[in-house]
Image: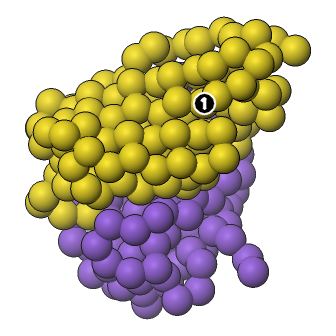
Amino acid sequence: GAGVSQSPRYKVAKRGQDVALRCDPISGHVSLFWYQQALGQGPEFLTYFQNEAQLDKSGLPSDRFFAERPEGSVSTLKIQRTQQEDSAVYLCASSFWTGVYEQFFGPGTRLTVL
Amino acid sequence: GQQVMQIPQYQHVQEGEDFTTYCNSSTTLSNIQWYKQRPGGHPVFLIQLVKSGEVKKQKRLTFQFGEAKKNSSLHITATQTTDVGTYFCAGTDHAGNMLTFGGGTRLMVKP
């Protein structure tokens, strides 16, 4: 079946622009996670949704970062007034249920801020 | 907050040699997961360990979870070129669902 998909795969933004990154999780997956992965580093947790509820947003680096999952399926990560330090790969992952289960990762969106 | 560290950061091996990566957490973990990320790819789940002292095998891969549930290791026997990639451990504490990833060990295999 279809895995987790993300769009766009690549995004180049000028400093100060707003961007929106989309994640389509595996159908029926309750949990959805966003991670930020800098070059040569491990993924860093940003935020977690259980269905449409955002249960943990402790990893969002600033109030410029906002995530939503209004109908409990597709999620959007929005970054306002992008800065150069926001350049990274943004990974989305979904998991079938709550609790700790295998996470299925999407291919990521590579964001470059000039 | 919880920190997860991995060593080594890089490892070059000759095809056929063994490889081990070590993972240490600053806090006791509820469970630990291992992921593999091929160059240019995304993390792919390998295994989850839950019990203290647990050992699991997948063909040439052996995973261990320490008795104190603060460390873990992944050992690959007789590496192959298909093993190339970065191996990440990721732990969860008792508080919830959030995974904290280690920095990863990048394995390079010379044929």
Image position of A64 (left or right of B67): right
Colour chosen for chain B:
yellow
Q: Report crowding for label 1: few under 14, some 14 to 19, many 20 or more residues within 10 A (C-alpha).
A: many
Residue at screen point 63% across, 68% down:
A4
- Residue B43 spot, x, y in % from top left: 58, 47
Amino acid at the residue labelled 1 = Ile
Considering every residue shown, the one lying at the far right of the view is: B111
Colour chosen for chain A:
purple
Check the picture and name the quadrant holding the N terminus of chain B: top left
Residue at screen point 52% across, 89% down:
A28
Can residue B30 be seen in this snapshot?
A: yes
Image position of A76 (left or right of B76): left
- Residue B96 spot, x, y in % from top left: 18, 63
Looking at the picture, does residue B24 appear above or below residue B10?
below
Q: Which residue is mark 1?
A: B76
Residue placed most toward the observer, A49 or B12:
B12
- For the rendered model, the colour scheme is by chain
- Residue B35 spot, x, y in % from top left: 53, 45
Looking at the picture, does residue B45 appear above or below residue A69?
above
Check the picture and name the quadrant holding the C terminus of chain B: top right
Can residue B42 be seen in this snapshot?
A: no
